[in-house]
Amino acid sequence: MIKSFTTLMIIAGIITLSAQTETDDQPKYGWQKEAIVSLNLTQSSFDNYSQGGENSTAWQFRSGLKFVNDQEKINWANTGKFEFGELKSGEDEAKKSADEIKLESVLTYKIGKLLNPFLSATGETQFAPGYMYKAEGKDKISQFLDPGYFREAIGIGYKPSDVFQARLGAAMKQTVSDMFNHYSDDPKTSKIEKLKNEIGAESVWDLNYKVTQNSLLKSKMELFSNLKAFDEIDVIWDTDLTTKITRLIAFNFNVKLIYDKDISYKRQIKQVMGVGLSYSLF
């Protein structure tokens, strides 16, 4: 599975690069900003409707932010992804349909045209408590910073263009949990650990492609290995497509795949699609 994902990202990078045309423009230094903020709303109501149906309301807020300070010798890239949504059906209570906080900061020192050393830090958690719903009720399984995932890495980055880039380096990963210790606890010990620290290697592949004047495709694959076993490689593959329909209305499509053996032996997939109010700058 990991090999197929990596191969696909390599092919995407090659296709994208082949579509680029060379320019002799001088580099523009300073801050570069990019933002996509959207709010999707769905509502349905039924009253004495012969074909049946159930009242429902759904909403989702999504934002992707990027701030890059590019100088002659240093590039400092900061990105953030924030997502939250709820769904209420009939008389049931509102349930989460999306919840994510992710921040990343990468500092690159320019020594060459394609290969340059970097330092990076990444953090990921959620806004609100998460529940596992059952016929007899619900069980709380997560909350803000419980679990929380953090990674720090140092290594070499490869950036042939603004469209595709990758990096590889030594990394550390911390999993933090307080109430829900199964995320961080080592079952082989009698002590309950609230912090799990892993040392290994990290590889990140980034595709940021302006498909058309009004469409932006962003795809990021993150791999982390604690170097213990091949089937313990953590995978996060997140792909977003945003298309502006009008100045304030946009179509959003997101697919996120996660494989982390410490959480589940099976792969996890989340897919979200919607049309709603949007402000974008890219």
Image: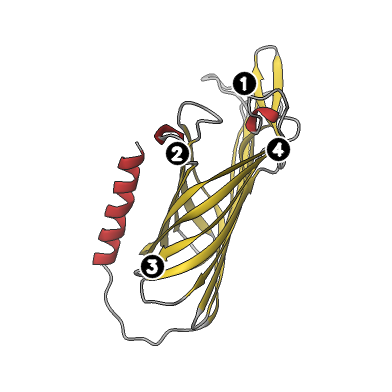
* CA separation in Å, label 1 and label 4: 44 Å
Q: Residues within 10 Å of mark 4 (few under 14, many from 20)?
A: many
Q: Label 2: which residue?
A: 233
Q: Quadrant of residue 4?
A: top left
Residue at image point 52% right, 57% down: 249
Residue 260: horizontal and vertical position, in percent?
50, 35
Q: Label 1: which residue?
A: 48
* CA separation in Å, label 4 and label 3: 34 Å
The disc labelled 1 sits on which kind of residue?
Asn
Left or right of 64: which side holds 228?
left
Residue 57: horizontal and vertical position, in percent?
63, 35
Name the N-terminal-most of marks 1 and 3.
Answer: 1
The disc labelled 4 sits on which kind of residue?
Asp
Left or right of 205: which side holds 51?
right
Task: Report the number of numbered marks.
Answer: 4
State yes or no: discs 1 and 4 in contact (Cβ < 8 Å): no
Residue at image point 33% right, 51% down: 9
Q: On screen, 58 above or below 104?
A: above
Q: On screen, 153 above or below 30?
A: above
Q: Label 3: which residue?
A: 159
State yes or no: discs 2 and 4 in contact (Cβ < 8 Å): no
The disc labelled 3 sits on which kind of residue?
Lys
Residue 233: horizontal and vertical position, in percent?
45, 39
Q: On screen, 186 above or below 107?
A: above
Q: Secondary structure at mark 4?
A: loop
Q: On screen, 281 above or below 84?
A: below
Q: Label 4: which residue?
A: 146
Viewer-side label of 2, 4:
2
Residue 169: horizontal and vertical position, in percent?
46, 56
Observer-nearest residue: 189 or 63? 189
